[in-house]
Amino acid sequence: MIGKLTLIVVQATLLTTILFQIIPANIIYAQPSAGLDPDLAAAEKGQKIIKVRQDGSGDFKTVTDAVNSVAVGNKVRTILSIGPGVYKEKIKVDRSKPFITFYGQNMPKLTFDGTALKDGTFDSASVIVESDYFMAANIIFENTAPEPDGKMNLAQALAMRISGDKAAFYNCKFLGFQDTLCDDVGSHFFSNCYIEGTVDFIFGSGKSFYTDSELHSVAKDFAVITANSREKDEDDSAFVFVHCKVTGTGNIMLGRIWKDRARVVFAYTDMVGNVSPAGWENSNPKLSNEYVFYGEYMNMGPGANTDKRAPFAKKLTEAEAKPFIDKTFIKAETWLLPPPNL
């Protein structure tokens, strides 16, 4: 018995030694499951940290310089550890640099003041991400352009545009007014996030799952959370909000028709009382209501009453809601990982 116990202890000690030799200090790896995309599983085995510190104590002082240092065709998880402070930069991660993580220390703010007038709507974003397998944790994304007053042309101002596939955001804030977050294309996951704006402050045609997040209107009167741009029946994308909160000011619409195959689902979400009784609207007479999919399931709060909802909105049955209200909707089992623990 003693001999067996000694052997077990020796084996355990040897295994521990091997693990410490393989895994660098200060990084805790997610355990990749057997079902992960092969390229992602390989990237997670060779993580690299780049420190961004405004005081010069890191590898770079700006996020832009850190991103530029990443090799084209990057194949390893590259974590930009971003120190506290306000970084006034227009940042772009192009599609040639996958597997990048922005990890904030004490919620750094990445901010700029681009507008559609200066840059075009889609390029007005303070941060643009076009690469796949992007991740952000503990970051504030902000556009400081003035709130549109109805008189200014092309006043849309994005805080973030995410156009890469298989991106995840944890504990992030998105601050702006009109068009705050361009959830453009690809599968995306948002957890414990705060998204603020006035009109269409989540827009695009991403296939996205939002959970435990707050959607906050700062509008003085008319407010719209979503403008989904799904255009084809065969497109399997949608904006899905599960266990979220709708808060803030103004007469809040959950969404309005931008393209006539728009698809948005709210489930188990707490809605403030100033959500419009109609909930949804079509402000464009050229677009049909016939093919939109605006679904609600088991929501709560004074704004969740569906008795006076727009006729093209749908109170979903359990069977109708089921395909949307789990992370399998975005095939999370093949790519979604938790943020690193630095």
Image (tube, helix red, strand yellow):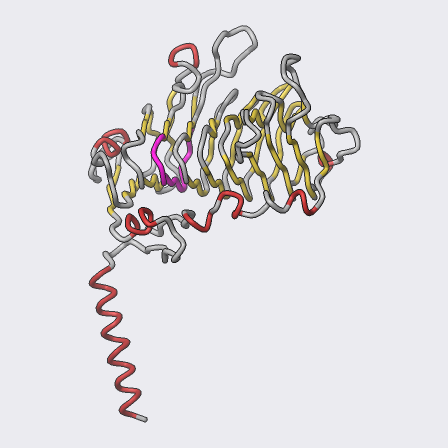
Whether residue 173 sits left or right of residue 255 in the image: it is: left
Q: Quadrant of the N terminus?
A: bottom left
Whether residue 245 sits left or right of residue 188 in the image: it is: right
Residue located farthest toward the front when viewing the structure as drawn? 234
Residue located farthest toward the right when viewing the structure as drawn? 307
Write down the quadrant of residue 57 in the picture.
top left
Write down the quadrant of residue 106 in the picture.
top left
- The percent coordinates of residue 175 (x first, y second) are 48, 28
Q: How many marks?
A: 0
Please report the bounds of the magenta region as a residue range: 130-141
**What residue is rendered at 62% in x and 36% in y?**
265
Whether residue 252 sits left or right of residue 84 in the image: it is: right
Q: Is residue 271 magenta?
A: no
- The percent coordinates of residue 94 (x first, y second) are 30, 29
**What residue is rendered at 69% in x and 47% in y?**
318
Between 132 and 244, the one lying in front of the other is 132
Q: Is residue 134 magenta?
A: yes
- The percent coordinates of residue 50 (x first, y second) are 24, 41
- The percent coordinates of residue 135 (x first, y second) are 38, 41
